[in-house]
Amino acid sequence: MPLYAYRAVSAAGEVSNGELDAANEAEIVDRLRDQGMMPVRIAPATGAGAAPAAGGKAARSGWFTPRRVTRDHVLALTRELATLLRAGLPLDRALQILIELAPTPAVAALMQAVRDDVRGGKALSQALDARREVFSRFYVNIVRAGEAGGALGLVLQRLADTMERNKELRETVRAALIYPTILICVAVASIIVLLIFVVPRFEQTFAQAGKALPLSTSVVIFLGTGLRDYWWGIAGVVFVAAGWFRRRGRDPRVRRIRDARLLRAPLLGDVVSKVEIARFSRTLATLLGNGVTLLTGLAIVKDTMTNVVLAGALDGVIAKLREGKGFGRPLAETGIYPRLATQMILVGEESGRLEEMLTRVADVYDREVQVAVKRFLSILEPLLILGLAAMVAGIVLSILAGVMGMTELVQ
């Protein structure tokens, strides 16, 4: 049977680490609970994945250790804190255990600062709000709602589930883009190798022939010698241009134009829109389910959206909601949110089941994202392959045209 490394907490709040062999993780959970232990983390017992010893020794630094707190760290902290609180541990003790379990020095320092604020009399939401570079407004408001309702452990569990689903959505898109990215890198590398190392070898031969070269051959040789002799200047221009475009991308007007064009782009716009709708619906459903009002929830969700056109359209929706015109109909009137999503939200609003319907919308569009990504890649991948073949063939044919011209001269 496979061996699993576990980290668990006793009723007294003591951290225990070890290894057990079992058929699956569920069996490990059952065995630990029978021993009066609350499992916090279970993973296959490999050399790198084994649970480190308690007492703060987990937070070790290394070459590949992240220097900051990542989204994955926040997700793990949220799930572990929810587990500890639901096991009946007080917040102060639960935070201390998280410090001992911290996987990196950055996480340990963060949790120490949060624990110190809590010990100083602040609420957990206040301690998190002081660290907005790590914890978003959405996160802080969910925690605040859990504190107000006296069910912080349960609320954190729901929050962790939402973060997990959003992570899966991001990973779906990211994994789908790996192959096209590799194709593009191979295409660029192949063309650079041809232009720098192959094409210049023909330059001297063509020059000795003393015959005017075809235009395509001259262009290819010019590009090859230029890359070979002035690669440092070209790299500098590319670096400066990338920095300029990045600064321009922060301009609200430029970003709005870019995001609007992105939504109208064939195939890609469909993917972007569905990803945003899925995240929007799940985030809002989580907020409503934890006692946040619709108006406040919409304002928070707006800050979490990456497309400024879709986010900006919520301003009008919020204004009409304040006037008593509802949520679903003003959302549909924006004209940029998918009709299916707006109709489902309208039905949920009219039936008094808005939270449930938003969750269904998120589930529907999670599946739609997978379909849209597959459709996009089914067209993009052949286009990339054909584009690479066409560019390489163009370079080769240009050289052959020059060689054929020399052959005619010899005859």
Image (cartoon, rainbow, N blue to C red):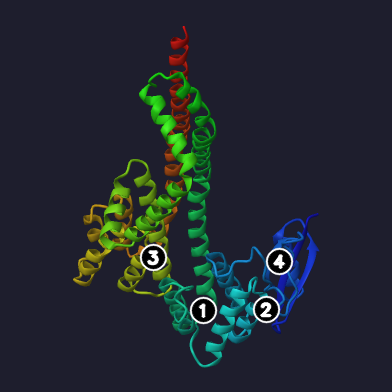
Q: Is disc 1 in contact with disc 2, using a CB cutoff of under 8 Å?
A: no
Mark 3 residue type: Thr
Report if residue 308 is visible in the image. Answer: yes
- State the separation of the CA atoms marked 1 and 2: 21 Å
The residue where tag 1 is placed is 152
The residue drawn where x is 50% and y is 74% is 155
Counting other residues with Cα less than 10 Å from the Cα at mark 1, is it few (<14), some (14-19), or many (20 or more)?
Answer: many
Counting other residues with Cα less than 10 Å from the Cα at mark 4, is it few (<14), some (14-19), or many (20 or more)?
Answer: some
**Of residues 309 and 165, the one drawn nearer to the viewer in this rendering:** 309
The residue where tag 4 is placed is 29
What kind of element bears circle 1? helix
* Of labels 4 and 2, the one closer to you: 2
The residue where tag 3 is placed is 304
**Of residues 384 and 280, the one drawn nearer to the viewer in this rendering:** 384
The residue drawn where x is 39% and y is 55% is 240
Mark 2 residue type: Glu
* Residue 326 shown left or right of residue 271 in the figure: left
- Of the two numbered discs 1 and 2 on the same chain, state the one appearing first in sequence: 2
The residue where tag 2 is placed is 100
